[in-house]
C-alpha cells in the first residue's frame, strides 16, 4: 500500500506539485460519483464538462471499489489517447459514443481526478460546454468546425471551432483576428450553402445554432472597399471603373445620385437626410451595427438601415462623383409597394417612410411593451408631457427619435358640453399649411354674337369657392356684356364636353380645361320646353373618304370650335337656320360669288325651300348613336386634330342641285357629334325636337377648301387682362407655423368621440409645440387636394438661413439662460419644380465638413451661395438646433488651421482667422 501511495505521489509530483492530499478510495468514489460536484450534478447551460476515456474510467472504478490501494488495478495517469484522431492537432475522433468511448465529468470532478492521478504528458484536456438547445440541455461534444476564408482569397481556408451557443459576432471577430483586419476596416460575413449559393449573415448577435451553421461550412469575410462599396455588390465588368473611382478624391458628401427613371424624389430626400450631421456620423462611425434590430415585426429586418448605411458610406467616402442607388431603390420597393416601379412620387412621402423604416430597424427596444395612453384629466402639463415622452421612449428608442422626434400638445374642446381633452403626442416632422388665397385665376375665351369679332382670351379673378355665375360676372366687367347673356362650356376635342349651369361650382373646372363663354340673346335658353329663343350647340364636320375597299363610303370628322347659337323659336326652320349659321360663320366663310353659280342666282335658289338640305332628306344617314367616345387631345385655340364621328353613304346619294347651291348641309347629332335622326320633327309650323338638339354643319372637302378659311377661324385676340399677373405676396415661414398652431374645427369625415357626451363631435382642435428635436423637418404643404380640386401652391415662403427662433411658439416653460435651445439654422432644402402631374425634385444642402452649400440635381452637384437657396420651389426644410451644431463642431488644436464655419453659422470672427 505504501508503494502504491508513493507511486501516486510521485506521478502527481511530476504533474501538479501543488496538489491536495489524496483522499481515501471511498471518499474519492463519493466525490466523483455522488456529490454535487460529481457525475450526478445536473447540466447547467454554459458550464464546462470534460471527456474521460471510458477504459481508463472503468479501471478507476474497479480500483476504488476494490478498496485496496496496493491493488494491481491502479489506473495510472488519465490517458485519453484513444479519443484523438492524431497527437499533433489533437482532433477528436468522429463518431465517439458516450458510455462506450468516454464518460463526461463536471469540471470539479475532472480537476479532482487530475489532481489525484495526473494527465498523460502533452495531452490537452477535452473540455466541452453545456448548451441549451430547444427543450433540452446537453454537453456539446462536437463543436461546429467552420472554414473561414476572405472574399479576396477563397482558396485558403482557416479552420476554427465554435460552440453552437457562440455568437456569430465571435465568428466575425475570430476571422478578423486571424486575417489581421485593422479596427478601422468594416467587415461582414457570408455563408456558402450546399447548393453553392451565398447568403448574408446579417445578424451577428444570434448564435451559431440559430444561424444554422454546420461543420464544414464555408464562411466568407468581406471587407468594405475604401470608396464605401462592397466587393460582392460590384460586377466583375466594372472593376476597372471602380479602381478609377477609388483613385478619385473629392470632398466627402459632394456626391450625386443617378436618376433611375423618375427617382428624383428619392434622390432629393436622400441628399437631405445625408446632410444631417449627427445621423451621418452615426452611420460613418458604425454605431448602427450595434443597434440593428433584426427581430422587430414593425421593421424591415435591418435591410433598410443597411442599404441606407451603404449609400452614406459611398457618398461620404470622397471617392465618387455620383453613385447608382439601385440596391436602395429595390429595398424600398420591396418593403413599400407604393414605391415599386418608376412612377413619380412625393419626396416628403418617401422621407416619411424612410425615417419610420430607419427608426424601426434601429429601435433599441427589442420587445415593445403595451402602453396605455392617458388623458391629462386636469393634471399639470409638465407632468402629462413627461409621462407621454417616457411612454413613447419605452416603445421607441433609436437614433431617429434622438435626432428628429419632438412633442406637441393637442387640445380638443367639445362644442356641446365643453369637455377639454389634452394629450401630448410625438412628431417626426411638422407639416405646416401655407396661407391660401381665396381667389383663383381662370383663363377663358369669350365668343361674341357679332361674327366680325374674333374670340377674346380673358384672364379672370374669381372666388375659389365660387359658382359659374361668378365667372360670368367677372367677364362682364371686361366686356360690358350682361352676365345673363352668357353661357359657359368646356370644349374638348372639337365638341362640348360640358355645358354648365349658372349655379354649378367652379371647383369642377380644372386649370387645364378649355373654357368658352358664349354670348347668347337675352331671352335664350337651352331646351325644348322654354318659350324663349332656343340655343343650339353647333358642331363642324368634314366629309372625308373612308379607307374602304371600293371607296364608296365617307367618314365625318369633327374640326374647329363648336358654337352656341341663339335661334328665334318662330324662325326655327332648316332654311332659316342655314342662313343664321351662314351669318355667324361669315368672318371665316366666304359666300359664293355669282361666277360660282351654274344655274340662276343665289337668291332665287335660296327661296326654293326644297333645295335646303334637311336631315330627313339625307339618304342613308345613320340613326344609331355610336355611344360616348374616349375624348382625344383638346382642340385648344389652335384647333387640334379632327375627330372621326360618323360614316354615311357617298355624295352620289345627295341631291346634286343642293351640292352646287349651298356650302354645307345640316344634320341633327348627339352630344358626341354622331348623326342622330330621331331627335326632331318638322311640320308646317317649323322644326321641333324631342330632346336636347345638337346640330352639325357638314362640309364637302372641296367646298370647305374653297370657302372655309381655317387660319381666320382659329384666330383670336388677347384682352389686356391677359397681360396682367396676379401678384402673390410672399409669406414668412413664421406665418405658416402660426397657422399650424391655430384653432381649427374638425371636418365631418374626422369627428372626435367625446367621452362625456358619448358621441362623435366636430370638436375644435389646437396644436402647440412643447418640445423641439435636434433636427427639425418642416414640410410646406404645397399640394392641396380636395373633393373637387387639386392644385399646387407656388407661393414664395421666406425662410431664414440662420436664427429661426421658435421661442414664441414653444409653450413649455423655457430655459432663459440657453436661448440656443430654441434657435435653428438651415442645413438642407428639398425643392419641387413643376405642377401636380409632373415635376422635378432637387436639393440644396450644406456640407457638414466644409460649411459650403451645394445644389444636388440627381447626379449633378454644383456649389451655390446662400442667396440662391430661397425660392418658390422650396418644399421640405431641414433645420438644426444651434446647440447641436456647436456640439458637433470639431474643436481644433492650437496647431490646426481655422475650422470652416458650420452650416448656417455667420462668417464672423468666431469662425474665421482674424489675423
Image: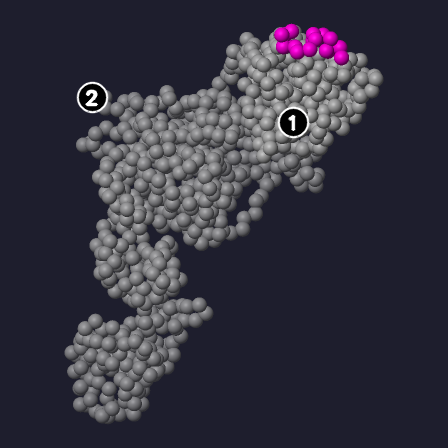
Taking the spot 36% from the left edge, 73% from the top edge, the residue there is: 139
Q: Magenta part of the protein: which range? A: 592-608
Circle 2 SS class: loop
Taking the spot 67% from the left edge, 28% from the top edge, the residue there is: 649
Can residue 251 be seen at all in this image of the molecule?
yes
Question: What is the count of numbered marks?
Answer: 2
Q: Is residue 596 magenta?
A: yes
Residue 106's spot in the image, x, y percent? 33, 75
**Disc number for residue 207:** none
Observer-nearest of 275 and 458: 458
* Figure quadrant of residue 92: bottom left
Near mark 1 (Cα within 10 A), the count class, few <14, some 14-19 or many ≥20, is some
* Figure quadrant of residue 821: top left
Residue 913's spot in the image, x, y percent? 23, 24
Taking the spot 35% from the left edge, 71% from the top edge, the residue there is: 140
- In this figure, which residue is indicated by the disc labeled 2? 915
Taking the spot 56% from the left edge, 27% from the top edge, the residue there is: 633
Left or right side of 567 for 123 = left
Amino acid at each position: 500500500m505504501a508503494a502504491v501511495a508513493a507511486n501516486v505521489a510521485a506521478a502527481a509530483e511530476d504533474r501538479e506539485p501543488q496538489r491536495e492530499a489524496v483522499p481515501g478510495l471511498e471518499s474519492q468514489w463519493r466525490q466523483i460519483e455522488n456529490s454535487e460536484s460529481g457525475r450526478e450534478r445536473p447540466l447547467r447551460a454554459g458550464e464546462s464538462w470534460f471527456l474521460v476515456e471510458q477504459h481508463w474510467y472503468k479501471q478507476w472504478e474497479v480500483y476504488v471499489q476494490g478498496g485496496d490501494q496496493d491493488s494491481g488495478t491502479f489506473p495510472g495517469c488519465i490517458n485519453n489517447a484513444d479519443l484523438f484522431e492524431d497527437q499533433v492537432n489533437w482532433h477528436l475522433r468522429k463518431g465517439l459514443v458516450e458510455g462506450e468511448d468516454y464518460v463526461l465529468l463536471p469540471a470539479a470532478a475532472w480537476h479532482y481526478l487530475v489532481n489525484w492521478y495526473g494527465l498523460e504528458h502533452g495531452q490537452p484536456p477535452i473540455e466541452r460546454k453545456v448548451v441549451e438547445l430547444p427543450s433540452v440541455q446537453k454537453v456539446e461534444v462536437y463543436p461546429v468546425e467552420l472554414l473561414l476564408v476572405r472574399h479576396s482569397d477563397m482558396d485558403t481556408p482557416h479552420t476554427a471551432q465554435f460552440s453552437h451557443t457562440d455568437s456569430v459576432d465571435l465568428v466575425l471577430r475570430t476571422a478578423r483576428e486571424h486575417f489581421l483586419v485593422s479596427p478601422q476596416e468594416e467587415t461582414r460575413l457570408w455563408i456558402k450553402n450546399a447548393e453553392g449559393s451565398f447568403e448574408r449573415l446579417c445578424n451577428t448577435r444570434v448564435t451559431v445554432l440559430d444561424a444554422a451553421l454546420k461543420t464544414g461550412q464555408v464562411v466568407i469575410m468581406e471587407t468594405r472597399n475604401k470608396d464605401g462599396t462592397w466587393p460582392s455588390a460590384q460586377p466583375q465588368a466594372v472593376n476597372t471603373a471602380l479602381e478609377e473611382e477609388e483613385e478619385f478624391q473629392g470632398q466627402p458628401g459632394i456626391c450625386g445620385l443617378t436618376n433611375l427613371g423618375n427617382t428624383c424624389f428619392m434622390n432629393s430626400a436622400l441628399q437631405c437626410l445625408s446632410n444631417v450631421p449627427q445621423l451621418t456620423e452615426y452611420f460613418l462611425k458604425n454605431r448602427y451595427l450595434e443597434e440593428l434590430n433584426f427581430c422587430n415585426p414593425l421593421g424591415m429586418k435591418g435591410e433598410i438601415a443597411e442599404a441606407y448605411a451603404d449609400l452614406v458610406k459611398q457618398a461620404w467616402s470622397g471617392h465618387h462623383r455620383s453613385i447608382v442607388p439601385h440596391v436602395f431603390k429595390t429595398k424600398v420597393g420591396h418593403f413599400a409597394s407604393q414605391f415599386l416601379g418608376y412612377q413619380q412620387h412625393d419626396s416628403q412621402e418617401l422621407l416619411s417612410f424612410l425615417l419610420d423604416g430607419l427608426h424601426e430597424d434601429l429601435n433599441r427596444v427589442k420587445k415593445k411593451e403595451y402602453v396605455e395612453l392617458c388623458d391629462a384629466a386636469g393634471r399639470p402639463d409638465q407632468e402629462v408631457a413627461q409621462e407621454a415622452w417616457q411612454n413613447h421612449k419605452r416603445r421607441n428608442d433609436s437614433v431617429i427619435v434622438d435626432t428628429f422626434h419632438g412633442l406637441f400638445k393637442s387640445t380638443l374642446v367639445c362644442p356641446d358640453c365643453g369637455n377639454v381633452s389634452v394629450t401630448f403626442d410625438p412628431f417626426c416632422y411638422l407639416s405646416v399649411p401655407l396661407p391660401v388665397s381665396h381667389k383663383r385665376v381662370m383663363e377663358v375665351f369669350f365668343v361674341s354674337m357679332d361674327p366680325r369679332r374674333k374670340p377674346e382670351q380673358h384672364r379672370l379673378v374669381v372666388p375659389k369657392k365660387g359658382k359659374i355665375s361668378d365667372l360670368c360676372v367677372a367677364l362682364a366687367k371686361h366686356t360690358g356684356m350682361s352676365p345673363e347673356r352668357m353661357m359657359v362650356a368646356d370644349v374638348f376635342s372639337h365638341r362640348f364636353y360640358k355645358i354648365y349651369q349658372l349655379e354649378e361650382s367652379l371647383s369642377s373646372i380644372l386649370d387645364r380645361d378649355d373654357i368658352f363663354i358664349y354670348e347668347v340673346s337675352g331671352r335664350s335658353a337651352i331646351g325644348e320646353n322654354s318659350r324663349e329663343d332656343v340655343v343650339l350647340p353647333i358642331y363642324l364636320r368634314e366629309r372625308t373618304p373612308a379607307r374602304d375597299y371600293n371607296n364608296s363610303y365617307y367618314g365625318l370628322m369633327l374640326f374647329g370650335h363648336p358654337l352656341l347659337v341663339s335661334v328665334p323659336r318662330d324662325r326655327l326652320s332648316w332654311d332659316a337656320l342655314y342662313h343664321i349659321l351662314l351669318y355667324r360663320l361669315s368672318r371665316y366663310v366666304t359666300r359664293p360669288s355669282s361666277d360660282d353659280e351654274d344655274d340662276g342666282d343665289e337668291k332665287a335658289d335660296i327661296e326654293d325651300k326644297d333645295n335646303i338640305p334637311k336631315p330627313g332628306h339625307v339618304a342613308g344617314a345613320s340613326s344609331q348613336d355610336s355611344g360616348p367616345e374616349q375624348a382625344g387631345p383638346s382642340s385648344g385655340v389652335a384647333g387640334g386634330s379632327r375627330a372621326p364621328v360618323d360614316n354615311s353613304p357617298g355624295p352620289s346619294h345627295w341631291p346634286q342641285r343642293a351640292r352646287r347651291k349651298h356650302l354645307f348641309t345640316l344634320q341633327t347629332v348627339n352630344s358626341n357629334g354622331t348623326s342622330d335622326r330621331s331627335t326632331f320633327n318638322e311640320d308646317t309650323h317649323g322644326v321641333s325636337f324631342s330632346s336636347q338638339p345638337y346640330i352639325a354643319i357638314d362640309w364637302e372637302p372641296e367646298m370647305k377648301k374653297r370657302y372655309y378659311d381655317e387660319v381666320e377661324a382659329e384666330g383670336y385676340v388677347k384682352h389686356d387682362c391677359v397681360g396682367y399677373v396676379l401678384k402673390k405676396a410672399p409669406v414668412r415661414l413664421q406665418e405658416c407655423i402660426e397657422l399650424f398652431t391655430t384653432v381649427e374645427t374638425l371636418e365631418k369625415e374626422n369627428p372626435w368621440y367625446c367621452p362625456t357626451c358619448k358621441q362623435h363631435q366636430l370638436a375644435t382642435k389646437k396644436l402647440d409645440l412643447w418640445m423641439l428635436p435636434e433636427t427639425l423637418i418642416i414640410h410646406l404643404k404645397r399640394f392641396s387636394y380636395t373633393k373637387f380640386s387639386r392644385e399646387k401652391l407656388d407661393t414664395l415662403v421666406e425662410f431664414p438661413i440662420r436664427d429661426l427662433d421658435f421661442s414664441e411658439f414653444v409653450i413649455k416653460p423655457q430655459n432663459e439662460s440657453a436661448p440656443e435651445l430654441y434657435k435653428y439654422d438651415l442645413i438642407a432644402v428639398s425643392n419641387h419644380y413643376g405642377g401636380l402631374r409632373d415635376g422635378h425634385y432637387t436639393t440644396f444642402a450644406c456640407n457638414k465638413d466644409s460649411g459650403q452649400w451645394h445644389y444636388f440635381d440627381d447626379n449633378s452637384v454644383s456649389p451655390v451661395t446662400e442667396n440662391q437657396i430661397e425660392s418658390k420651389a422650396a418644399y421640405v426644410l431641414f433645420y438644426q438646433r444651434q446647440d447641436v451644431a456647436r456640439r458637433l463642431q470639431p474643436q481644433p488644436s492650437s496647431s490646426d488651421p481655422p475650422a470652416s464655419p458650420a452650416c448656417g453659422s455667420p462668417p464672423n470672427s468666431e469662425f474665421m482667422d482674424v489675423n
